[in-house]
Structure formats: C-alpha cells, structure tokens
Amino acid sequence: MPKFVIEREIPNAGKLSADELQQISAKSCSVLRDMGPSIQWVESYVTANKIFCIYNAPSEKEIREHAERGGFPANAIHQVTGRIDPTTSEVSAVPA
C-alpha cells in the first residue's frame, strides 16, 4: 500500500498540551475507524508550527477525505517513493 507524508500547518502546534494532542489523536482515530482499514495512521511528528503525519493509504483521495472528515488541514500530501537510512550507504544494502 502506498505511504504518504502529510504536512499539516497548525500554528503553535509545538505548544499544544498533552490533552490537546490526545483530543486530536482521538478525533483522527475515530474518523479512521469510520473509514475502514484501507487507510492507516502510522505516526506523526509535532514541530513548532506543523505536524507531519505518516499514513498508508490506497491514494491521496483517502488522505484528503480523512482530513475533511476530521477537520484537519492537509496543506501538502507527498507520496513516498523510496526510503533511505544510514545502511543505504553500505554497498551490500544497495539492490543490484
């Protein structure tokens, strides 16, 4: 299933309280339950003014639907086309 990175512009996201983050998470999970198993939230990273979310979904359409239903911004949606990490630098890690 394709993986996506969603950029959500949320002013002062880094200052959200634990309770506020819990409420956002609960709303997202509720919408995901209603949408069914074809879309999955993997994890999110909170920064000063944005939240970056990793999702598995059949297409960008489901990501946008989740955002609309949950009332979340989805300012940019990028499909992941590859993945690298420190082991990528090792000759044996690169596929032939």
Image (cartoon, rainbow, N blue to C red):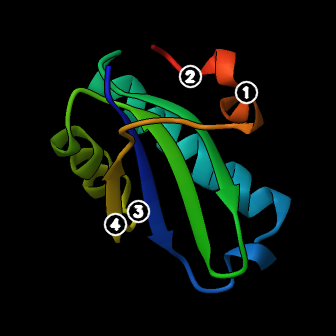
- Mark 2 surroundings within 10 Å by alpha-carbon count, few (fewer than 14), some (14 through 19), many (20 or more): few
In this image, 60 relative to 46: left or right?
Answer: left
Residue topped by disc 3: 72
Cα separation, mark 2 vs mark 4, equals 30 Å
Q: Do the numbered discs 3 and 1 sit on residues whose CB atoms are within 8 Å?
A: no
Q: Residue at x 45, y 50 (%)?
A: 5
Q: Residue at x 51, y 34 (%)?
A: 29
Image quarter for residue 32? Answer: top left
Return the residue nearer the eye: 75 or 66: 75
Secondary structure of the residue carrying numbered label 4: strand
Secondary structure of the residue carrying numbered label 2: loop
Q: Do the numbered discs 2 and 1 sit on residues whose CB atoms are within 8 Å?
A: yes
Q: Do the numbered discs 2 and 3 sit on residues whose CB atoms are within 8 Å?
A: no
> Sequence order check: which comes first, mark 3 or mark 1?
3
Q: Residue at x 66, y 31 (%)?
A: 88
> Sequence order check: which comes first, mark 4 or mark 1?
4
How far across and down, in percent of the image, does residue 75 sit?
35, 71
Which circle marks residue 94 in the picture? Answer: 2
Residue topped by disc 4: 76
